[in-house]
Image (cartoon, rainbow, N blue to C red):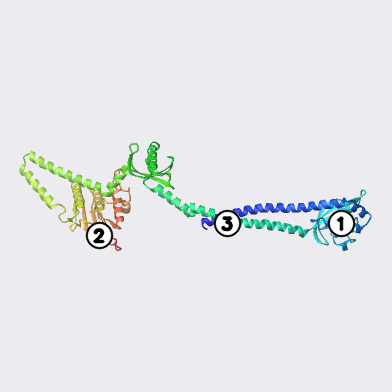
Amino acid sequence: MKLENRIRVYILTLLTLSLMITSGLFIERELRLIEDKVQGNLKNVSSLVARDPFIQKNLYEKNPDLIQNYVESTMESLEEIDLIVVADMDGKRFSHVDREKVGKYFVGGDEKKVIETGESYFSKAKGTLGISIRRFEPIEYRGRQVGFVTVGKLYWKIQKVKRGVIVYFTSALVMIILLSFIPASTLSHSIKKELKGFEPNEIGKIYEEKKTIFESIHEGIVAIDQKGKITRMNRAAESILNDSRLDKLKKIAEETIESKHGIYDREIDLQKKKVFINSIPIFKDEIPLGVVLTMRDSEEVNKRAKEITGFSQLIDSLRANIHEFKNKLHVILGLLELNEIDEAIKYISKLEDEVGASRFENADINDSILLALLTGKLNTAMEKGVKLKLIKGTYLMSDHGRISTSDLVIIVGNLIENALEACDRSMRNGIEVYLKESEDDILIMVLDTGRPIAFDVEKIFEKGVSSKNGNIRGSGLALVKEKIDLYGGEMQVNQREGTKTFKIRIYKGDIDDKSYNS
């Protein structure tokens, strides 16, 4: 059942129960008052008749006609009394609403008590007129009981009055319940509107989702109300902040609310910890409710940026090129200082041949950035005593379509770096790289004969998992996996007979057939 209907039902149910209980108490009270009123009337009239000297004397003298006439005239002025019967000590009637019953004996059997004991009491019994509520009073004359009087009210008339009361209150109850539909519907609709139309289970689900998202976001998130009080903070923010750093955040929140504009990518110093911060104001009907701040550690942002753009790979390659160039200059300088002019000339000629031939003479690489990366990795490999070469047929275009050069730098650079880490100066260790680009895709293969992967191959692509030693490990191949997934690519890793091969294919367009021959 929807929330709006549920609220309506709850309100009406609560209201109905309350009104039923209240009406029940009122009805019970009214019915009791009716009975008390009837009994009061019967008691008063019976007492008056029993103490009437005329009745006492004529009952003693056995004058039924006088008593009947007197009682008839008395009943004309009484509205709530249905019968007055005067009888002697034998139960013989001296008055009755039906004159034909005068002279006959009392019916019901409830008169014996007043005859035998002379007590006054109420009774419910069936007489000649039907069931009635009766009041018995003894009649005395000159200190001696000479008979009794009973004054009654027919029971069906009492019930009729009671039913009228019940119908009245029940009708009022139904009318109130029907009218309460309007405020109940208005209230339920208003509540539903305040909840933006969501059901309670949907709100609970959204809350859990928001809570999970809030805590899983790497950025620190802090909510500050309009009074500068921090109302919420996720775990990432707690790891960045402490109590001494909160004042700066509160000042930024005040600035944001005053300006009514957000602050984006501002770098601030939180006691030797630099963070990038965004501050977004929250307004409702132009009334400020607070500010939401997000923050990220500057060092982490810069490190991630370098990893994503391949900047560190290019820097390493450039450093290797510079180092190799310096080594060759030192050799030339040494030969000149020894006055070995001819040897210096031969060495320079040899270098010219090496540069001209290059290790990439069988490759056609038109992307200058990738070529610089491969050149740097080649020099690094030479320094480590590891053979690195490009397999014949390697070909890369200058433009790779939707595949960015920086992403290729990340994939190729990390695969070669991983291979270099696995190799040592042994003559049998080497690395082979094959790159092949077509109109549809790019095939990348990196083969090395270094140390094998010592655990489950699938785990090497998880961030933080590495088979190497070091303080910062396990991010390179994880980045490779991210880029492969980005382009809907595929990857195979094979290990056999001392050789491991990483084989990757990434796609330049959106195509359905992404299979390739292994």
Q: CA distance from mark 3 to mark 1?
A: 56 Å
Q: Which element carries disc 3, helix, strand or loop?
A: helix
Q: Where does residue 146 sit, x and y in percent of width and height?
A: 91, 53
Which residue carries the number 2 mark? 441
**Amino acid type at image mark 1:** Val
Q: Residue at x 74, y 59 (%)?
A: 160
Near-viewer residue (240 or 115)? 115
Near-viewer residue (129 or 178)? 178
Locate residue 260 relative to residue 32 in the image: left or right.
left
Q: Which mark is residue 379?
A: none
Q: CA distance from mark 1 to mark 2?
A: 123 Å
Q: Which element carries disc 1, helix, strand or loop?
A: helix
**Amino acid type at image mark 3:** Phe
Q: Where does residue 371 sit, x and y in percent of width and height?
A: 19, 52
Which residue carries the number 3 mark? 181
> Sequence-wise, which precedes: disc 3 or disc 2?
3
Near-viewer residue (406 or 170)? 170
**Amino acid type at image mark 2:** Asp
Whether 412 is drawn above or below 246: the answer is below
In this rendering, which labeled residue sits more in front, label 3 or label 2? 3
Q: CA distance from mark 3 to mark 2?
A: 68 Å
> Sequence-wise, which precedes: disc 3 or disc 1?
1
Find out whether the residues at labels 3 and 1 contact each other: C-beta distance under 8 Å: no
Q: Where does residue 374 sit, x and y in percent of width and height?
A: 20, 51
Whether 412 is drawn above or below 229: the answer is below
Whether residue 421 appears in this view of the structure is no
Whether residue 314 appears in this view of the structure is yes
The quadrant holding residue 179 is bottom right
Q: Which mark is residue 71?
A: 1
Locate residue 459 relative to residue 47 in the image: left or right.
left
Locate residue 356 relative to residue 121 in the image: left or right.
left
